[in-house]
Amino acid sequence: MCLFWLPLGADGNPAVRWGGRAYEAIAARLEGRDRLRLFHSALLVRLGGTSFVVEMAPAWGAPAAERGVVGEGAVGLALLGRSRLFRYEIRRWRDGVIADADQAVNSPSDLNATDGQARALLALVPRCPTPVWGRDELATGDMWNSNSLVAWLLTHVGLHGDEIAPPVHGRAPGWDAGVRVAQRQMERNGALTASEVSPWP
């Protein structure tokens, strides 16, 4: 299982790139620190001879009809999610591709996952929460986004999401939200056992 750190806007979308820069400029000023490079994350999971891409991405402009969508959520505001332009999708994409993988930094990073952890993670993908992207509906002190999905999954399968960090001089908004939500669920319900996770594949 490999983790990819992708610079925000690496896909060439100018709205994402400039929006991210504006957001980071404001955040850095409010927090009294230097600006950092923003990253989003994705996973490549291999089992035997098959690979799966696990990521959160916009529902619009999707690269293929069959991309393993297992969940969707709204972007910005719940009401806006009625439009495809303001929805994100969670993918568990068999033989999928990470579109901007060639621009990833310090990637791919091998997480040294066991086959059991990889299977459990793939089975958990459809069970990830789907709050509004970019907001803190789950009261974690951090927004929910693509990094939250990856951190939530890694934490649930025991891959120490709270110890993973983006590249030097970088920041991954949303990561802490995923870790904290997973930890809360595990404290409340206990760690998932193999029998509680549907076999995959």
Image: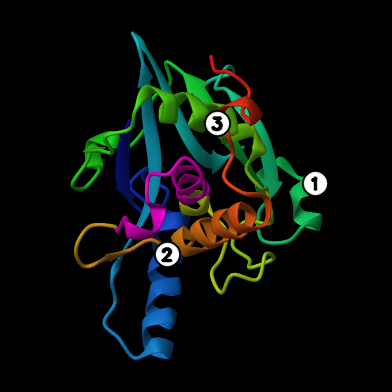
Earlier in the chain: of badge 3 and badge 2, it is 2
Residue 19 belongs to magenta span:
no
Seen from the viewer's position, the closer of residues 33 and 8 is: 33
Q: Which residue is mark 2?
A: 20
Q: Which residue is mark 1?
A: 82
Q: Percent position (x, y) of residue 2?
A: 30, 34
Q: Amino acid at mark 1?
A: Arg
Marks 1 and 3: CB-CB under 8 Å?
A: no
Residue 187, disc: none
Label 1 neighbourhood size at 10 Å, few (<14), some (14-19), many (20+)? Answer: few
Earlier in the chain: of badge 2 and badge 1, it is 2
Q: Amino acid at mark 2?
A: Gly
Q: Percent position (x, y) of residue 146?
A: 50, 49
Q: Alpha carbon of mark 1 to alpha carbon of mark 3: how far?
A: 19 Å
Q: Percent position (x, y) of residue 128?
A: 62, 43
Quadrant of residue 32 in the image?
A: bottom left
Q: Residue at x 44, y 44 (%)?
A: 154
| Quarter of the image with the N terminus in it | top left
Earlier in the chain: of badge 1 and badge 3, it is 1
Residue 157 belongs to magenta span:
yes
Residue 166 versus residue 33 in the image, above or below: above
Q: Which residue is mark 3?
A: 91
Q: Nearer the viewer, mark 1 or mark 3?
A: 3
- The dominant secondary structure in magenta is helix
Tell me: 120 left or right of 171. Answer: right
Marks 3 and 2: CB-CB under 8 Å?
A: no
Tell me: 51 left or right of 86. Answer: left
Give the residues in magenta. 149-165
Q: Residue at x 58, y 34 (%)?
A: 193
Q: Alpha carbon of mark 2 to alpha carbon of mark 1: how far?
A: 24 Å
